[in-house]
């Protein structure tokens, strides 16, 4: 005889865990922003961001799995921290 049981589970939600995850994400973004703020910076180092943020490299990859995700998040973080930059359509639109 074969019994099949359906187990209903409720989603696990923890406001404290959500806050911790948000703080971790913000620390990682701040580490990336710090990297880009250094003279001559040309790339984002996941390993360096992990050390600066005090997390594992795997955690950085969990929050930002690829370069596109990292760059998009850093740009959004900069907009939140500094306000959006004015959009420039081209070189002709730059002030003299």
Image (cartoon, grey):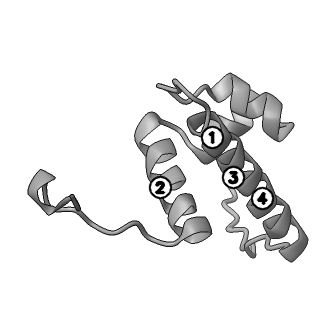
Q: Nearer the viewer, mark 4 or mark 2?
A: 2
Q: Which residue is mark 4?
A: 21
In the image: residue 38, left or right of residue 91? right
- Residue at image coords 45%, 35%: 67
Q: Secondary structure at mark 3?
A: loop
Q: Nearer the viewer, mark 4 or mark 3?
A: 4
Q: Earlier in the sequence, mark 3 or mark 2?
A: 3
Q: Which residue is mark 3?
A: 1
- Residue at image coords 73%, 68%: 7
**Most extreme residue toward the right, as rendered?**
16
List x then y, in percent, for residue 26: 72, 56
Question: Mark 4 packing: few (<14 Cα in 10 Å), some, or many (20+)?
Answer: few
Q: Nearer the viewer, mark 1 or mark 4?
A: 1
Q: Nearer the viewer, mark 3 or mark 2?
A: 2
**CA–CA distance in space, label 1 to label 2:** 10 Å
Q: Secondary structure at mark 1?
A: helix
Q: Earlier in the sequence, mark 1 or mark 4?
A: 4
């Amino acid at each position: 005889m074969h019994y099949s049981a359906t187990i209903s589970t409720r989603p696990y939600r923890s406001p404290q865990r959500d806050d911790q995850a948000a703080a971790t994400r913000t620390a990682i973004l701040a580490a990336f922003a710090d990297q880009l703020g250094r003279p001559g910076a040309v790339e984002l180092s996941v390993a360096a961001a992990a050390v600066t943020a005090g997390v594992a490299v795997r955690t950085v990859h969990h929050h930002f799995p690829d370069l596109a995700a990292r760059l998009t998040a850093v740009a959004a973080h900069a907009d939140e921290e500094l306000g959006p930059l004015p959009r420039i359509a081209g070189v002709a639109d730059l002030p003299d």
